[in-house]
Amino acid sequence: MATILSVSGSPSPTSRTARLLRHLDGRLTAQGHRVTPLDVRTLPAEALLGADFGHPAIVGARRLFEEADAVVIGTPVYKAAYSGLLKSLLDLLPQYALEGKTVLPLATGGSTAHVLAIDYALRPVLSSMGAAHVVQGWFVLDRHISVREDGSVAVDPEAREALDRVVDQFSLALAPERLAPARAAAAPTAASVSAVAA
């Protein structure tokens, strides 16, 4: 159905955020989507911090965004906002890197005091990058995410039902008949291609 880029903005190698995303990747894959994971922490720090737009890893990350029909953005909440690591990557993407794409924002954190970080910190950035549709996001408390011995994730029943519903609504928004108008809007017209060529 759709090609989805699943982006974790957590700097931690034992991140609950990343593990939760990979858990949700499985649900989306089971629904017929092709999911590509991207852990921002695996990109070279010198390229991110030095704003090296031409670094092969950054070029590759930009290509993943270009090829995706939709993007899941997951981040831990620090100081009432999304992670600085995620900000570093978003700053290296083209201004309209999300044009024509459907985006699902997710956040994790230790307190419900951070629940508005999605709407007040992350959503405006995603919209400014041209996202065609930013679906309802979701915040998951750290204590509702437990890691099993094999590294897989278990989500507390209190959070799982709502989270599954949000992910399923995102999946429904990726139906071919809904994606087609967004793809058409994002595609360059002959006139714009000619203007660029000139």
Image (spheres, rainbow, N blue to C red):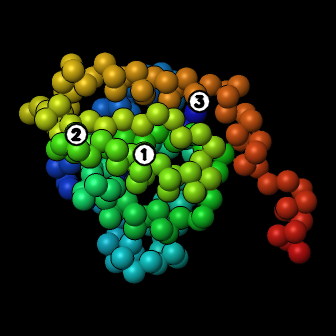
Q: Quadrant of the C terminus?
A: bottom right
Mark 3 crowd level (few <14, some 14–19, many ≥20, 10 Å Cα): many
The disc, 3 or 2, on the residue closer to the chain's N-terminal end is 2
Q: Hey, what amino acid is under mark 2?
A: Thr
Dividing the picture into quadrants, the one containing residue 10 is bottom left
Report the number of discs.
Answer: 3
The disc, 1 or 2, on the residue closer to the chain's N-terminal end is 2
62 is higher (above) or lower (below) than 132:
below
* Residue nearer the viewer, 86 or 176: 86
Q: Residue at x 31, y 37 (%)?
A: 139
Image depth: mark 3 or mark 2 in front = 2
Rounded to the nearest whole Å, what is the CA distance between mark 3 and mark 2?
29 Å
Residue 132 falls left or right of residue 29: right
Q: Residue at x 16, y 44 (%)?
A: 110
Dividing the picture into quadrants, the one containing residue 17 is top left
Residue holding disc 1: 119
For numbered disc 2, what is the local secondary structure?
helix
Q: Residue at x 57, y 45 (%)?
A: 68
Residues at discs 3 and 1 in contact (Cβ within 8 Å) = no
Residue holding disc 2: 112
The circle drawn on residue 174 is 3
Residue 74 coordinates in the image, percent (x, y)? 36, 46
**Residue 116 visible here:** yes
Residue 101 coordinates in the image, percent (x, y)? 60, 44
